[in-house]
Amino acid sequence: MFDVNQIAVIGTGYVGLVSGACLSEFGLKVVCMDVDESKINCLKRGIIPIYEPGLEEIVVRNEKSGRLSFTTDIGEAVEHATVVFIAVGTPPQEDGSADLKYVLEAARSIAKCMNGYKIIVDKSTVPVGTGRKVKAVIREVLRERGVDYDFDVVSNPEFLREGSAVNDFMHPDRIVIGTQSNKARKTMRSVYRVLYINNHPFVFTNVETAEVIKYASNAFLATKITFINEIANLCEAVGANVQQVSNAIGLDKRIGKYFLHAGPGYGGSCFPKDTKALVNTGKEFGVEMSLIDSVINANDLHKLKMVDKITAALGDVEGKTIAVLGLSFKPETDDVREAPSSTIVHELHRRGAHIRAYDPAAMENAARFAFSDLPIAYAQDEYDCVAGAHAVVLVTEWNQFRSLDLEQMKSTMAAPYFFDFRNIYERRDVEEKGFAYFGVGR
Ligand code: NAD
Ligand code: UGA
């Protein structure tokens, strides 16, 4: 019954699917479960519902070998597993706090079909105290069922990034395991033995500390980005170059060079929601998180500042066509959740601009979710996108936008304005082709 090689993953989204697929690649037998039937049906046919480099290959290979399977039946997933991961969403509520209904519902469903000792591992990003809530829910259901199985609840937050999720899971900077049970700690080390053998750092803590580590990490990264964006605004005003500032300060090992790229503001399914949830947790415990609160406000303002920059250069955007290159919140993903493109496009539309947009992977999600309320013209490629436009606005730094044929673009545009919100072009190169160039902080 106690087989650490049998894993269940409840919730087969970005984190659940990547974790499940990578654990099966480590040689474990993994059953991924989701309540979304269409998602599971796709996966059973070898169709990957998200754009994530390297994932399809691993899913298909391990599905064929029988190590990875998919189901909507939670009983089937939990029955043979000792370790059950919860990887469902924790979306923001109106007040910014994390909505725990999916996590607690998953815990309830697991408890309903528990048939012996299990380790329930929370991989979703959850506010401190959730481990205790999960434990209480499971106890309650077991009591209702009249059974008395032993179980442990572990917090094992995930630090992967979309777009490099497989690599991040396989080569993590650290694996955080929050539990006070020796049995659970030993089992978790065994689940991750491939990483343990390869000397990836393991951090063992209690559940609460592990929960805080996840939010503290995301809030720190969001702060770093917001800090450099604020410096970028200053650089622009005084004629300095933020990229050189960022390179130079990053050489100080205490600061570090990563996450110091100025841009249009951070987005995605995590930083925006997790910073808000952290402030909310602070409120709940009577702790004012004024720094993180400022980061959230500064980031919101920074995104709007991008639109001011376009408006100031063009005089007015009313009736003008703006070509937007890149809609996903970052390259190599089709995820548009809280993408800076969404704020920028909505605000441009509000100011009367017509929008043409192109993204290599995210147009379907953009049309369904981020811009379902807007009349956007979706283009076939980057050149089709800019034809007839009064300005091109590069919002996401997809590789294919790094070597655009600027001459060809200019020849079809109504006006030569180039807004490079990811600083991927040299001003001189773009100006040489006859464009007016606007970066961020230089
Ligand atoms: P997601 O929305 O892509 O996937 C969540 C999945 O859970 C969905 O497929 C949904 O159908 C399923 N689900 C909901 N309730 C369920 C239930 N009761 N039983 C079974 N399945 C259920 O979410 P995601 O991006 O994978 O994020 C999951 C969690 O991981 C969040 O807490 C997030 O903050 C955290 N996280 C995300 C990332 C990331 O890059 N996306 C990275 C680290 C951590
Ligand atoms: C982020 C964290 O990096 C992961 O460690 C974490 O697991 C994840 O959130 C999560 O908790 O879900 P992700 O949101 O996928 O990952 O992507 P990032 O690469 O962190 O980018 C987030 C946003 O910051 C993007 O909009 C990106 O363009 C922006 N960014 C990033 C910058 O503007 N500048 C930078 O230097 C880096």
Image: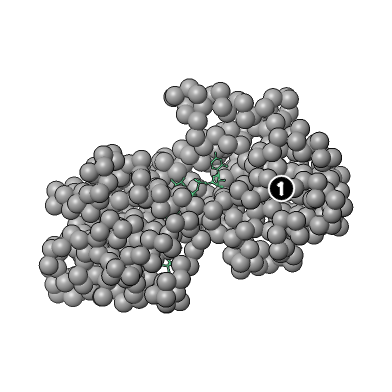
Locate residue 179 relative to residue 183 in the image: left or right: right
> Which one is in front, 34 or 212?
34
Residue 377's x, y, as percent?
74, 65
96 on left or right of 362: left
* Looking at the image, residue 441 lies above or below residue 44: above
Residue 125 in the image, given as x and y percentages of width and height: 39, 53
Depicted 422 relative to depicted 58: above or below: above
Instruction: Specify whether 109 is left or right of 238.
Output: left
Find disc 1 in the rendering and name its residue.
Answer: 404
355 to 300, vertically: above or below: below
| Residue 21, percent from left and from top | 35, 61
For numbered disc 1, what is the local secondary structure?
A: loop
Residue 328 falls in image quadrant: bottom right
Residue drawn 68% across the image and 43% down it: 421
Q: Residues within 10 Å of mark 1 (few under 14, many from 20)?
A: few
In what quadrant does ligand 1 lie? Answer: bottom left
